[in-house]
Amino acid sequence: MAGTAFASPSAAHDPGRSTEVGHGDRDPLVAARTAFFNGSGWTAHLPEPRPDRRLADAAGELARLLEAEYGLRPHAVPPGDGPGVDRHDKAVAGLRRAARLGVPLTPEALLAHGAGDPRLMAVLTELWPETVRWHGPRHAEEVLRATLGDSRDGPPVGRLLDLAVASGLRPFTPVEGASLARDTTHRAVRHAAWRYLHQLPGGRAHLPGTSHAEDAYEHLLLAPPAPALGPWGEEHAGRLVAQSMLLGGLDTPGQGMSGGLAVLLGGLGDRLAETDGIAGVITVVTAGHEDLAADGRLAHERAPGHWVLRLPVDAPSAPAQPEMHRHRPALTWWATRLLGGMSRPLDVVHVRYADDGSLALADAAERLGAALVFTATPDPHRGLAERHAASDPADPAAAEALRNDLHRVFVADRLVERADTVVGIPGRGGTQDLVRHFPGLAQLNGGSGPSAPPEGIAPYRDAPDEDDRRREALARLYRDGTCPDALDPRDRDLPVLLCVGRLHPVKQQDLLVRAWLATGAHRTTTLVLVGGSPGTGTPVEDDIRRRIDALLAACPEAAGRLALLPALPNAEVRRLQRALTERTADACCWYVCPSAKEEFGIAVLEAMDAGLPVAGPRRGGVAHYLRDQVNGILMDTSSQTGLMRGLRRIAATSADDRGRYATEGRKLVAERFSVGRMADELAAEYTALRPR
C-alpha cells in the first residue's frame, strides 16, 4: 500500500520506527514478520542473520522456511539448509524478500527462474513490472527474446509471452507470434500467443479465424465480444465500482466454493447501486466451459445499476483457489479488456481474497487506472504455525500445504502494498488481530489501524404468500425420515439443530455430526445440515458426505433424525429459518456454526435476524459480535470435545435464556449489521479515493 511500511526498504526498515504489535509474540510467523517489517531482525543490509529466541519453539521445517524468507534464524536451529528447505525454497524466499524490500532485480536474474513452479512464477510476476521500469523496456524485450533461444514450445514460452503482455513489450513480430501459436502442442501457450497478438499493432490480422477454435472459450478468445455493461452516462454521477467474486458462483451459495461471500456481495451490490456517490456496481465472477455452454452471456443486469460480469476461464467451471494461479494472466487480460471497453472508465476495484485471482484483478486495476481496495483478513496467517508446527515434514501433502499457506501470506502482503486503501474485518479486539499479522497497517488512521466497515445482510422480504411457503418448507423437511434430505414426521416436536454452509473441511459439518452422536443428542434432537451441490458434487463435498454417511452407518437409529439438504437459494434458507423460529418452545431451533474459523459469518447473522438463538466458534470474526451468554453461545470448535461441550451447553440452556439470546441477536443485526449501513460506509471509502 503506497505510504505504508510495505512500500520500500527505507520505510519498512527504519530503525527509529517501532510498534508494540507482535513484540515478544510466541507465534513464530508473527514474530518473524514483526521483526522483519519493524527492522529488528536481519535485513539485506546486515552481514549475518540474527538469532531470535521468539522462534525457538517453531517446528524445524517451518522455522527454516521462515529463516529463508524473513532472514531470522530460530535460536535452536543451527546454520545450514537443513531438511525440508532446498534450493527451490531458497529461490522463492529470496525473491519474496526482494519484492518486500522493493529491490528491482535485473531481467536476466528474474528470467533465470522462468521455468519455476507456480509459487516461483507468482513472485517473478510481481517483480517483473518494477524490473522493466528500472532497466528499461528495450533491455527487457531483448532478454525475453534471448531467453527463449531455440526453444519455441513448452509452458515457459507461454509464461514469457504473458510477461511481455503484462508490460506491453514486443519481443516478437506478429509473424513470429503467430508461428508460436500455430506450432505449439500446448493449449496454454497457444492462448498466451493469441493474447500477445491482440496487443501488437497489426497483430490481430495474424490470428486464425474463429472456425479454428476448439471450443467456446477459444472462440471468445479469438473474437472477444464487447459485453453491454451499463450504460452509464453523465446522469450517473459517482464512482463506478467493480467487486470480485472469483471463487464459486454468485447465485449458488452453499455449492462448491460459494459461501457467505456470495450472499454478501449479491446484497451489497444491489444496495450500493442505490447509494449516493455510486454510479453503478459490477460484480466480477468467472465462467468456465460448462458455465458458458449453459449460458453464453458475459454480462447481465442483476438489479438496477448492479451488473454481473463473467470472466471466461479455461476450465470446466470456476477454478478452486489452489488452481487460480494458472489463470492469473488470462484473468487480467479478460478483466482489462472487458472492463476497459465500457462507455466510461472504471473508478474502483475491490478484492477480498488473498489469492492469485485478486492479484489478477489488481493488475487489471493498474492497467485501467482504477483505484484498488483490499479487504485484509488474518487468513491464513492466524493459526498457520499451530496447524503446521506438529506436521510431519516427510508428508508431501503437509509440506505442500505449508508452502501454499506461506504463498498466500506473500500474496496478501502484495495486495496490501498495491492497494490504495485497505479495510479490515474486525475480530474480538477490533482490528488489532489484523495489525498483529500485518505490522505495516499499524500506521493507518493515526496509528489505530485500518478502518473496518461493518459487514451486513440484506433485509428479508416476505413473499405475498409467505405463510403458505413457510408451511410448505416445513412439510418438505418432515416428509420422510428414510430420505437423506428429510426428517421423520414423528420427530416434528423435537428440538432442531440447524447448520447452513458449503460442505468443506473448514466448516466441519462431519465433526458436528460426530459430536451430536457422541453426546447422545440424536436421541433428543434432530440435526439439519444445508449445503453442497445438488446431484454430483465436488470431490471435497463428496468427501464430507462420505464421512457423514460412515458416521450414520455406525449409528443407524440416528439416520432418520439427520437431514442433509443440498444448498438452497438464500431466500429459501431464510424462510426455513423463520418457519423453524415459529414453532413451540419444546420444538425450539438453534442455529449451530461448527466452523474451525469464520472470518465473519453471514449465515450466523441471518440466523440471528430470523430470531434463532445461535452458537458459534470462538475463533475468528464471529466472536466480534456474538457475546457468550449475552446474545448466544461461543463454542470451542477446535476439537470434537469442544463441540460436545457446546452441544451440552445448548441442551442445558433454559427457555428464558434462549429467548433472551434470540431477542438480543435480532436487535444487534438491526442496529449494526444492515447491508445499508455497510453500503454507506464503503461508498464513503470509495469516494474518498483519488483517481490514479
Image: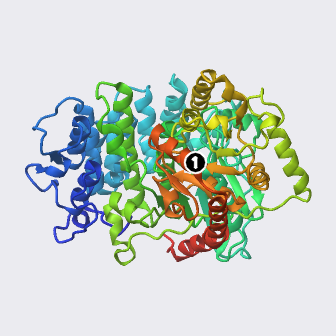
The x and y percentages for residue 176 are 48, 33
| Image quarter (top left, top right, bottom left or bottom right) of the N terminus | bottom left
The x and y percentages for residue 489 are 82, 36
Quarter residue 39 falls in? bottom left
Front in this rendered view, residue 233 or 643: 643
Identify the residue at the far left of this view: 47
Quarter residue 210 falls in? top right
Residue 174 in view (yes/no): no
Instruction: Please give left or right for residue 276 compared with residue 158 in the image.
Output: right
Q: Residue at x 64, y 59 (%)?
A: 658
Instruction: Please give left or right for residue 188 compared with residue 491 in the image.
Output: left
Residue 577 in view (yes/no): yes
Instruction: Please give left or right for residue 449 compared with residue 177 in the image.
Output: left
Q: How is the image coloured?
A: rainbow
The x and y percentages for residue 202 are 57, 45
Marks counted in the figure total 1
Q: Residue at x 59, y 35 (%)?
A: 520
Instruction: Please give left or right for residue 227 compared with residue 416 in the image.
Output: right
The x and y percentages for residue 608 are 65, 60
Front in this rendered view, residue 137 or 466: 466
Q: Is residue 212 above or below residue 96?
A: above
What residue sits right under mark 1 in the picture?
593
Q: Residue at x 49, y 59 (%)?
A: 623
Q: Secondary structure at mark 1?
A: loop
Mark 1 surroundings: few (<14), some (14-19) or many (≥20) residues within 10 A: many
Three-letter code, disc 1: Cys
Quarter residue 88 falls in? top left
Q: Is residue 660 above or below residue 555?
A: below
Q: Residue at x 49, y 30 (%)?
A: 180
